[in-house]
Image (cartoon, rainbow, N blue to C red):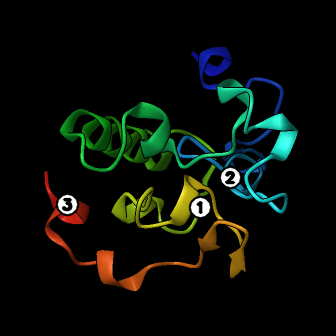
Amino acid sequence: MQGFLGWDVYDHAWNLAKYTLGSHDDVGDQNNGNAEDGLTNWDKRHRYFVDRLGGREDWGARAKCRLAWALNVAMPGTPMMFMGSECHMASPHVTWGYWHDGSDAHGDHRFNWSIAGDPLSSEA
């Protein structure tokens, strides 16, 4: 079981950080959406997890993100979550679907506080 969870090489569970919803490496992009040629290759695009599953408006995508969140906090290791993933932040609430500190060629990508308490962010 430890091998399945990915921490069999660590002495202690807290030595491993888990990112089931993505990290800044998965979501962040300083190249106007073209990290790793992401504009031409969907598999390499940096996106929020909910975007990869179908978008914030898709109930199934939100359900999968809730499951990923639950696994992230329940599995051994230190749970790490990228800002906005807790309320299903994604396109179009983040222009172009990736995070960037401020504005770039595709608009403003900072945390959108208006979605933090909207019906979709807390829908079970």
Ranked by sequence position, the earlier of labels 3 and 1 is 1
Secondary structure at badge 3 equals: helix
Q: Amino acid at mark 3?
A: Leu
- Residue 37 location, x and y as percent? 84, 36
Above or below, 26 relative to 24: above
Quadrant location, the N terminus? top right
Is residue 94 toward the left or the right of residue 2 in the image?
A: left
Q: Quadrant of residue 11?
A: top right
Q: Are marks 1 and 2 in contact (CB under 8 Å)?
A: yes
Give me the residue at 75% from left, 42% from top: 12
Is residue 123 toward the left or the right of residue 25 in the image?
A: left
Q: Amino acid at mark 2?
A: Ser
Residue annotated with mark 2? 23
Residue annotated with mark 3? 120
Above or below, 115 relative to 80: below
Q: Amino acid at mark 1?
A: Phe
Ranked by sequence position, the earlier of labels 3 and 2 is 2
Is residue 41 toward the left or the right of residue 1 in the image?
A: right
For disc 2, the neighbor class at 10 Å (few under 14, some 14 to 19, many from 20) is some
Q: Are marks 3 and 2 in contact (CB under 8 Å)?
A: no
Residue annotated with mark 1? 82
Secondary structure at badge 1 equals: loop
CA separation in Å, label 1 and label 2: 5 Å
- Residue 51 location, x and y as percent? 46, 43
